[in-house]
Every structure is written in structure tokens, then in C-alpha cells.
Image (cartoon, rainbow, N blue to C red):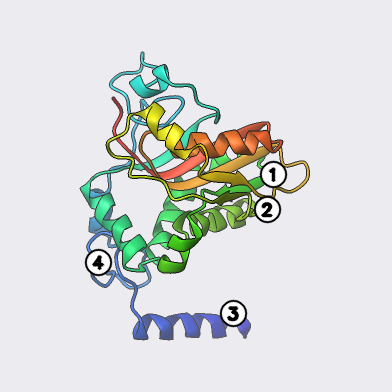
Amino acid sequence: MEKMFRKITAEAADLLFPRRCPVCFDIVQPRGELICPGCVKKLSIVKNPVCKKCGKAVEHERLEYCLDCSRHRRSFEYNLAVFEYNDCASRSMAAVKYKNKREFLDFYGEAAWARFEKRLVRMNLQAVAPVPVHPGRRRTRGFNQAEILAEKLAARLKAPLCPDALRRVKKTAPQKELDPSQRLKNLEKAFEPGKLPPGAERVLLVDDIYTTGSTLEACARILISMGAEKVFTLTLFVGRGA
């Protein structure tokens, strides 16, 4: 009876508030899906070969690391990325962040799990932590997209969700004109340690977009200082490799 009630409630909600596609923004067709089947092709899945550290696509299999990762130290083990950050992805995530289209994260969470389920399970994770946003930005936006994604993955993994593992205490200057080392320095004092479960030595750090890796690097260093032995990262999107 309870299962039937939930189904009826979900169907009623879909009639009143039909789900929108994260790519075309129209009502998803057919009903019940998380994305229009034709729109999936507009998102570019990251294909092998990829950089063994950041997950960006590289030109050929002989390249173990992209140019960025061959030049800069990474404290995290490696990053898993689902899609390349193209124009379509940029519009979709802008709608999530600035137009409150957090329902799009239902699709992206499922896509991440479908792509990396086996690898995530093999990590034997003891905590899942999102990259935090500044409290002021969270108040304005109403949510942290990385936390929503982390919650979905933690539920699948049956691992503790740790939304307070890290705190963002400083708004950083615009990063676009900075090189990777300057970006990392810009972020050094932006984050502070929060709380991890006792014995959480293997941690998954979750964010929406990987560009230079400076944000993930700054957060990974703090998690390691808190006792994590290995920090793995996962992002929905990653920029193109150099």
C-alpha cells in the first residue's frame, strides 16, 4: 500500500510540476525519464585515454598525465570525471546554480553512479565530503550543488555523508586570470577543517567542475591534515586536457 501511495504521489507531482530536461530545459519526453534521450548526446562523455590523475582526456595512450598534472603536484589520488565541460554543460550548470534547477542533479547523480559504480565501490570509502561554498553564497543560492551530489553518492555507497568536513571561510578573488600556482595560493586560506568521522582514512571529495584542480587540491590537503590517508575526487565535469 505504501509503495503504491508513493507511486501515485510521484505521478501526481509529475503532472503538476513536470520534470525539465537538464540540456534543452523543455519538459522531459518521455515522461518518467531524467533527460530527453536525444539530449544525452549533447553532453560529451569523457572517453579514454584520460590523465591518470585529473581524468581529463589526453591525446594518446602513451601519455600518463596531462600537461597540468605533469607539472603540478596533486595531493588527491585521482579524479573521476563524467563529462567534458562544453557549452552545453556550462548552460546546464548555470541553470542549476543561478536558476535553482537543482532537479537536474538527479540526472547527473545517476550518470556519475552509472559510470563509476564499480570503481567507487572498490575505493572502500569511509566518508563522502562536498567542496563547500561560502555561507553568503549558500544563503543566496539556497543550496550547495556539490553537497547534493555528494548526498546522492553517499546514499548509493552507504557511506557517511560529511557536509561539514570542510568550511569555506573566505570569498576568493576571481580565478580566471590566475595561473595554477596563483589559484592555489588564492585558495589556501579559503577553507578550514571541519569534522570527519573517527577513522575516516579514505575520503571521496565531490565537486561539480574540475578546471585547474586548485580547489580540489586545497581541500584535499586539509582533509589529509585531518587524518585522511587517501583522498579521491569526483567531478561531474572536467575541462579539456592540455
Compute the Cα span from label 2 to label 3: 26 Å
Which quarter shows the N terminus?
bottom right
Left/right of residue 130 with respect to residue 225 in the rendered view: left
| Mark 3, secondary structure of its residue | helix
Is residue 197 found left or right of 178 in the rendered image?
Answer: right
Q: Do the residues labelled 2 and 1 touch (CB within 8 Å)?
A: yes
Disc on the earlier residue, 1 or 4: 4
Q: How far apart are marks 4 and 2 (CA)?
A: 33 Å
Identify the residue at horizontal 41%, vertical 55% (top origin).
Answer: 108
Closest to the camera, between mark 1 and mark 3, is 1
The three-letter code of the residue at mark 2 reads Pro
Q: Residue 158 carries which label?
A: none
Secondary structure under the numbered disc 1 in the rendered image: loop
- Can you identify the residue that label 4 sits on? 25
Disc 1 residue type (three-letter): Gln
Mark 2 nearby-residue class (10 Å; few <14, some 14–19, many ≥20): some
How far apart are the two marked residues, 2 and 1, measured between alpha carbons? 7 Å
Relative side of 165 to 40, left or right? right
Quadrant housing the C terminus: top left
Q: Earlier in the sequence, mark 4 or mark 2?
A: 4
Label drawn at residue 160: 2
| Pair 2/3: label in front | 2
Is label 4 in a helix, a strand or a loop? loop
Of callouts 1 and 3, which one flags the residue occurring earlier in the amino acid sequence?
3
Q: Mark 1 points at which residue?
A: 126
| Foreground pick, 194 / 60 | 194
The earlier-in-sequence mark between 4 and 3 is: 3
The spot of residue 193 in percent (x, y) is: 64, 45
